[in-house]
Image: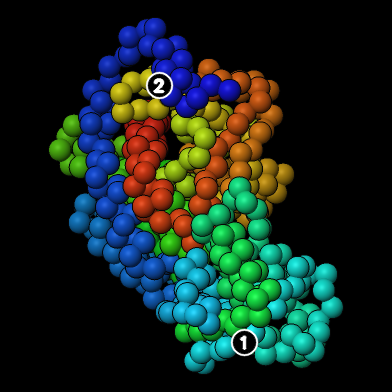
Amino acid sequence: MLSRPVLAFVLAASFLQAPPVVRPDEEAFAAGVSEADLRRYVRELVAFGPRMGGTPSNEKSAAYLASFFKKHGLEVAIQEDPPALAHWESAWRVELEDGSVIESAWPFGFSASTGGVRTGQLLIVPDLAKAAPDAAWAGRILYTPGEVTRAYAAVVKSGHLPAAILTSAPNDPTRYIAWSRLSSLPPSAGHPVPVFAVSYTDGRSLDAAARAGRSVRVSLDATIREGRGKTVIATLRGQEADAYYLVCAHGDSDSGGPGADDNASGVATVMEIARVYAALVRSGRVPRPKYSIRFAVWGAEYRSARTFIEKEGEKLKNLKGVINFDETGTGAERDAIYFEGNDVPWNETLLRTFEAVAGDYAGRQGFWTEYTTNPSQGGTDSYAFLPKKYRGTGQTELEIPSTTIYTAAWDKLAELDQTPGWESKGTPDPKKLKIDYSLYYHSSGDTPENTTEREPQNMVRAVKVTGLTLLRLNR
């Protein structure tokens, strides 16, 4: 396999055979993109907390975003979701009896407060999902390398309540080594046993401590109550004001962790497109777009997009296309940008425009080397606008072009068969696609230091390719 630098050189060389076509409006947009601002947006968003819908950190991030968009001259509205149970954690600690802190420990969503410090002797349960609850579990702290969520209800129902459960799932020495894979219990305020995820390395320490008969102390200060997710929607008015493109990203961290790549990077991308486009229109360097552009940062992934669809009603017919961002801040093995959903027939015009822009600029300094469209994978907000046949939620029967732009997906390299007729010049194997991933997907390690600070160029590329595509679509 070619190394990333060699692959980049080979691809770049192939793209530089013809001189680029100079388009002044596109050059102006690309020149206006600020990597420093993108990095700053992510840091500021992550500092609010996980930003889950209906929580204080969602409120703070919504206020921050509304202020940002207003500052740049956009019309701003706030959408509220219907009430739903929300959770957030203020403080927690997991430590061995000698005072050694398990640094990677992160509480599962909807784990209730401990009401102080709980201490219990460690007990190993190799596979909690297959184990029969035992009276010996009562008051102990269970450590399992296996999955917890499916077994949790049976543990509680047995009445043999442990003081806490610690898990290093997926317990893979090649993944989640120094950071924990985050998860959640079902939404409820009544879970009596807190659960904490730990890294593979800390799992080994807990295993050794359990075998030595050691104890562990845990504490958790958490809040679970009903809340209403807040979505910020900003509008750059077009010449045909009612028709619009929707540029969006989910504002919550999804997993309840730091959420720098997933999805502060996507939010930062939306912010920077809005800033640059609005500034160029104000200065007259770019004409007002033919169609309006609405920038949405969803309060909660999927849920807020569904609320938007319901509230739009008949006006949804004016939606020309959805451009969603999810994980534009990292990549583990490749240096690529992806445009999703080429198996959706009515996505063709939108995705061919992205593909044309990508081909025109590939290999130029400050742009990308590898790019491709790919079939639908599901799992993000663009699918709220698609039918179930294409992994969508089926919220609307309208044929709305809808794509997600990203640089990483999931937590391991994926191989997809390319949709026939979409073989790309911008990727080494146009028929068998390799989809990059994040080492920090849904983990306690999804911090700016690990993702967006290491590869900020990914966000820059996502902003540029989308801004240039919107210019072409709106001429």
Q: Residue 49 location, x and y as percent?
A: 39, 68
Residue at the image position 51 percent from the left and 89 percent from the top:
117
The residue lying furthest to the front in this view is: 212
Q: Is residue 73 above or below residue 216?
A: above
Q: Position of residue 234 (x, y in %)?
A: 33, 55
Q: CA distance from mark 2 to mark 1?
A: 58 Å
How packed is label 2: few (under 14 Cα within 10 Å), some, or many (20 or more)?
many
Q: Which residue is mark 2?
A: 362
Of 384 and 418, nearer the camera is 418
Q: What is the x, y in percent for residue 384?
A: 58, 53
Q: Circle 1 — which element?
A: strand
* Res. 28 image quadrant: top left
Tally the marks: 2
The amino acid type found where label 2 is placed reads Ala
Q: Amino acid at mark 1?
A: Gly
Q: Quadrant of residue 150?
A: bottom right
Closest to the observer: 69 or 213? 213
In the displayed structure image, the side of residue 237 where residue 135 appears, left or right: right
Residue receiving disc 1: 120
Of the 4 image quadrants, the one containing the N terminus is: top right
Query: Which residue is at the front of the view, 451 or 418?
Result: 451
Task: Determine the residue located farthest toward the top in the rendered image.
Answer: 17
